[in-house]
Image: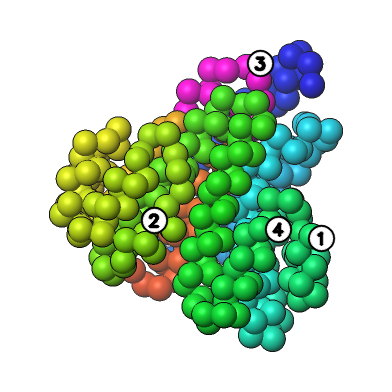
Amino acid sequence: MAEKEFAYAVARIRCRELALLDGAFLEQLVTARSEDDCLRLLAEKGWESAPAEEMLAAEEEKTWALIRELVPDRTELFDALLLETDFHNLKAAVKAVFMNADPARYFLPRGTADPMELYRAVKERDFDALPERLRVPGQEAMETLLHTRDGQLCDVILDRAALDAIREAAKASGSELLVSWAERRVAAADMKTAVRCARTKKPLDFIRRALAPCASLDAEALAQAAAEGEEALAAYLAATPYAETAKALEESFAAFERRCDNLLIEEIRPQKYNSFTISPLAAYVLARENEIKCVRVILSGKRSGLPEEAIREKVRETYV
């Protein structure tokens, strides 16, 4: 796509950014009396007037429909943002085949691959029919599950492969934003995994297998620290570019997870000032995904009767 065509697409995105939800509005949702009140406030903001899950699905589809409209011939540039869905669906397919269950209820929309084709390939052991990025991890996960019956190990194989694939797809996109976002995405996932492994006292070999390599963290050192325990892990994190996550971990695991997720929003904010590349479009998709996730957390909290402070602790920073 020519630079001027990017400029047009970015100009359209700039207009859409004006409708993004800010922190003040999310706080208004947090303090609303009920889920119905939240839905009413969202409808006033232009969100679909529908039950919660239908509304969230409609908003997700709006985002990707806009991208398909703006860059109809270059949607592969956004593969890095869709691969997590592909690997989720592959995981659902593998487990459905193993348990002889219907996988359809577990599939997510908007991946790069047809979920039922993934299921067919796994069921028929036709792994060559899988998209290239999914072939080896799909076969390994299926064989591991059949031989060990260890669903957690199956998850580790596919989750790690998803992170590797996201990094590679980001590099292939040519977008500096996607490359830097993918780096932080992998680092955040590794840190969360390391903390969970430390808390559940997983052995070093398991932790090594679960962590994906990235430039900003030493995966081996992170694994060693997690194997030693949470105190050693916090000390390691304090000496990395993500030192603030160690401080958050001292507060609570929820605060730690929120800090890891906020790293991603902080990475994409500078794209507000970039008008001639694909990066602002990717940043908009990520911003929308983040706000939809925040709304989902708030609605779920209201539905469950959680106190405002408990909901507020789970809400992430916004792009605007």
- Residue 64 is a magenta residue: no
Asked whether the residues under the numbered discs 4 and 1 touch, taking CB atoms below 8 Å apart as contact, a structural biologist would say no
Residue corresponding to mark 2: 208
Of mark 4 and mark 3, the one earlier in the sequence is 4
At x 76% / y 72%, what residue is drawn?
125
Query: What separation in Å lies between label 3 and label 2 (alpha carbons)?
Result: 40 Å
At x 41% / y 43%, what residue is drawn?
187
Q: Amino acid at mark 2?
A: Arg
At x 68% / y 38%, what residue is drawn?
78
**Nearer mark to the viewer, of 1 and 3:** 1
Which quadrant, please, contains the N terminus? top right
Q: Residue furthest bottom?
A: 100
- Left or right: 211 in relation to 310: right
- Residue 271 is a magenta residue: yes
> Is disc 4 placed on a helix, strand or loop?
helix
Q: Amino acid at mark 3?
A: Phe
Q: Amino acid at mark 1?
A: Ala
Residue 115: image x %, image y %?
75, 64
**Nearer mark to the viewer, of 3 and 2:** 2
Query: What separation in Å lies between label 4 and label 1 (alpha carbons)?
Result: 8 Å
Of mark 1 and mark 3, the one earlier in the sequence is 1
Tell me which segment is drawn in magenta.
Answer: 268-282
Query: What separation in Å lies between label 1 and label 3 (alpha carbons)?
Result: 37 Å
Of mark 4 and mark 2, the one earlier in the sequence is 4
Q: Nearer the viewer, residue 109 or 230?
A: 230
Q: How many marks?
A: 4
Residue corresponding to mark 3: 276
Query: What separation in Å lies between label 4 and label 2 (alpha carbons)?
Result: 22 Å
Residue corresponding to mark 1: 129
